[in-house]
Image (cartoon, rainbow, N blue to C red):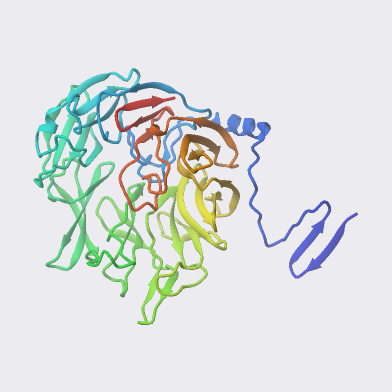
């Protein structure tokens, strides 16, 4: 027997407790049955030479690619990874790993023996070369220090290493053929933080005399300014202001275009960071997002707009988080309505904005093929929602533990870590799980030593984290995982 009741533009069809509304798309609950898992794995096995982003890098990047989506150019991990090797040379506070074709670069100066940069054979875990003299300068001995690695042409690696005594940082060029420092570079913009987008480095400086911030493009030798863009405001003076944000967000790039959020000089007060598309060849702004929702109104007639935050590129679309879709809130309150918004890379046209849900807070997002996997809080519960990047529709959603966190993706799969606690809320185990991006189906579960992974909300994997830094592990192009612990390095496969 069927009972059909028509009301407005919704139709309620009752057969066996089934509800359908013509204007409502209900997200699926992922099917974790063996049949669904086998079907997802069979489909993912066809993924080869996976390229989520137009990034010509041959060495790994901390967050996958220049698209900054935490999605690696690697096949999906289809079964629980196992330890292939682990070394503990007596290091303490080990540098985040950098993976090249044959080697893993890491190390520490915070130890008495085996200090320095170690270049490790990826297959065997044996240290091939060690550069120890870098620990003897700049008061680095006994400290972890600030380290970054960058890919250079001709199979060389640039190692940025700050000195602890306040003197200028070093830019060492390391040959992967000899394992030696072959030269040092001198940054033409002293003290400027740098980022790398292929053959162009960017540096950020401020001109207090002229009243603006400068985004510069540099060559790979760091001694030539290719272009300068002075269209940005100075940094906010009051870091205690609840609306404080750095002038520039981290950036993502693809097809020779850099996307970042920044405070433009043309903006009316109070300014917010707007998503900008900048040509990496000449530094010119191609387009800028100016349709931020209003997030807050206060008694001083100040109206604040949503900050565009950190952009990622998934399925060749630029995606940001916006707040205030359902209207502004009281001063310093949480805006009503959080959503993801996608743009056409070349034109800046808004392609879609997801529909906000009550009490939804977006706290992380990673790429998983054509899906952007999004970690959300809905009241006191934590979930992962899968949005289709074609149209922004919510495809599936599943609950996860409040002790779990979204990490990264590869080959159309994504990975979640979790701290398992006992009845007294004591940490007793660490779990890593793999999921299919298209369906949200659980692929595998693994228990791994807690020293291998980062899971908490301040982890660098979390794009909203204020702590910064780099993840302690990375996924290589063949799907192997290389990481560091407090005392050494390891490989999982």
Query: Measured along the vertical axis of the image, is residue 328 above or below residue 342?
Result: below
Between residue 60 and residue 113, name the one nearer to us: 113
Percent of width and height locating residue 267: 31, 71
Between residue 233 and residue 28, name the one nearer to us: 28
Percent of width and height locating residue 43: 59, 32
The residue under the point 40% across, 48% down is 462
Percent of width and height locating residue 391: 55, 54
Does residue 298 appear in the picture of this structure?
yes
Between residue 220 and residue 2, name the one nearer to us: 2
Q: In which image quadrant can residue 249 be found?
A: bottom left
The residue under the point 22% across, 65% down is 234
Furthest residue to the right?
Answer: 1
Q: Point out the image quarter for the N terminus.
A: bottom right
Furthest residue to the front?
Answer: 424
Query: Measured along the vertical axis of the image, is residue 461 above or below residue 485?
Result: below
In the picture, measured across the screen, residue 337 lies left or right of residue 5, that is: left
The residue under the point 26% across, 23% down is 89
Q: Point out the image quarter for the C terminus.
A: top left
In the picture, measured across the screen, residue 457 lies left or right of residue 151, that is: right
Percent of width and height locating residue 182: 13, 29
How many marks do you count on the picture? 0
Does residue 416 appear in the picture of this structure?
no
């Amino acid at each position: 027997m069927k009972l059909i009741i028509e009301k407005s533009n919704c139709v309620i069809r009752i057969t066996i407790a089934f509800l359908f509304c013509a204007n409502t798309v209900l997200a699926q609950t992922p099917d974790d049955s063996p049949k669904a898992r086998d079907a997802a794995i069979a489909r993912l096995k066809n993924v080869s030479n996976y390229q989520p982003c137009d990034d010509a890098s041959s060495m790994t990047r901390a967050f996958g690619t220049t698209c900054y989506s935490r999605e690696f150019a690697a096949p999906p991990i289809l079964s629980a990874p196992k330890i292939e090797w682990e070394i503990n040379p007596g290091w303490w506070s080990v540098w985040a790993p950098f993976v090249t074709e044959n080697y893993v670069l890491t190390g520490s100066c915070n130890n008495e023996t085996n200090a320095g940069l170690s270049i490790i054979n990826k297959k065997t875990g044996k240290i091939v070369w060690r550069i120890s003299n870098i620990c003897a300068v700049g008061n680095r001995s006994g400290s972890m220090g600030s380290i970054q690695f960058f890919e250079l042409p001709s199979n060389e690696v640039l190692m940025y290493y700050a000195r602890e005594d306040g003197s200028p940082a070093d830019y060492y060029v390391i040959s992967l053929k000899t394992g030696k420092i072959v030269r040092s570079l001198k940054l033409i913009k002293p003290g400027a933080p740098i980022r790398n987008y292929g053959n162009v480095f960017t540096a950020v400086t401020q001109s207090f005399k002229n009243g603006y911030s400068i985004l510069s493009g540099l060559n790979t030798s760091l001694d030539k300014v290719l272009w300068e863009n002075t269209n940005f405001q100075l940094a906010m003076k009051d870091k205690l202001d609840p609306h404080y944000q750095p002038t520039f967000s981290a950036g993502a790039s693809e097809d020779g275009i850099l996307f970042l959020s920044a405070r433009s000089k043309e903006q009316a007060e109070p300014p917010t960071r707007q998503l900008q598309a900048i040509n990496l060849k000449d530094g010119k702004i191609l387009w800028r997002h100016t349709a931020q929702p209003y997030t807050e109104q206060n008694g001083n007639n100040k109206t604040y707009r949503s900050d565009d935050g950190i952009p990622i590129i998934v399925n060749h679309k630029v995606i940001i988080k916006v707040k205030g879709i359902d209207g502004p809130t009281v001063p310093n309150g949480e805006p009503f309505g959080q959503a993801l918004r996608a743009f056409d890379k070349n034109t800046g046209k808004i392609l879609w904005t997801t529909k906000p849900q009550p009490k939804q807070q977006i706290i992380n997002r990673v790429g998983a093929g054509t899906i952007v996997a999004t970690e959300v809080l809905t009241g006191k519960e934590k979930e992962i929602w899968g949005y289709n990047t074609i149209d922004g529709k919510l495809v599936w959603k599943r609950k996860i533990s409040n002790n779990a966190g979204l990490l990264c993706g590869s080959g159309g799969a994504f990975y979640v870590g979790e701290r398992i606690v006992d009845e007294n809320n004591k940490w007793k185990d660490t779990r890593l799980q793999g999921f299919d991006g298209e369906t949200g189906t659980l692929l595998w579960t693994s228990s791994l030593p807690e020293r291998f992974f980062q899971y908490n909300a301040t982890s660098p994997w979390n794009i909203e984290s204020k702590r910064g830094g780099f993840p302690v592990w990375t996924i290589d192009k063949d799907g192997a995982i290389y990481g560091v612990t407090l005392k050494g390095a390891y490989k999982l496969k």
